[in-house]
Amino acid sequence: MKVLVVYGSRLGATRGIAERIAARLEASGLDAALEAAEQVAELPACDAFVIGSGIYGQHWMKEAAALVRRNRAALSKSPVWLFSSGPVGRWASGHDPVEPKEVAGLRAAVGAKDHRVFAGALDRSSIDESNLSTIERFVTRKFMPEGDYRDWGRIDAWADGIARDLNRLRPS
């Protein structure tokens, strides 16, 4: 089975999660490909999709949300899982994750099997080379705590669950 893992990432943390998910799917015997949302004009033929985005201001990145909306007809015919990445610092633990504002609509549009919010990471050295706006750079530097808050065990468990679901769908 061919699975496309697509991500929207500005500072690299969401890309890292997508890479980890693709690696777990590959390790389970699935054919997993990885693409940045802004590089995907039209989805290739695949058996399943995992699509994720970094969260900025409680929203998915425009490129990732637009990809889902633009391809909703094709996505609704295949198994789809969605994930979000973003809470850091005290928001990464001790609080229930907040689903980005448009995710409920995206889930409904494509019949997604699941959506998860994973804690993110912030490496301040990645800010200068990013495409963050001036205001986003200021807020990120001033108010966002640096560190890697990603829970790799939780991410692995979720990816392994997707792999189990897809391997059950394989023809014998």
Image (spheres, rainbow, N blue to C red):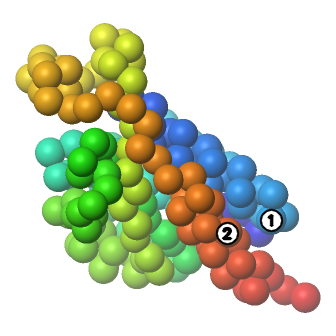
Q: Would you name the residue on which mark 2 appears?
A: 160
| Mark sitting on residue 114 | none
> Do labels 2 and 1 touch, CB within 8 Å?
yes
Q: Residue at x 51, y 72 (%)?
A: 80
Rendered location of residue 72, percent (x, y): 38, 68
Q: Is residue 95 toward the left or the right of residue 44 in the image? A: left
Query: Would residue 59 be visible to someone looking at this image?
Result: yes
Location of residue 14 (image quadrant):
top left
Q: Would you name the residue on which mark 1 appears?
A: 28
Rendered location of residue 81, percent (x, y): 49, 69
Query: Would residue 44 be visible to someone looking at this image?
Result: no
Q: CA distance from mark 2 to mark 1?
A: 8 Å
SS assignment at label 2: helix
Instruction: Check the picture and name the quadrant holding the N terminus.
Output: bottom right
Against 133, residue 59 (above or below) is: below
* Amino acid type indicated by mark 1: Ser
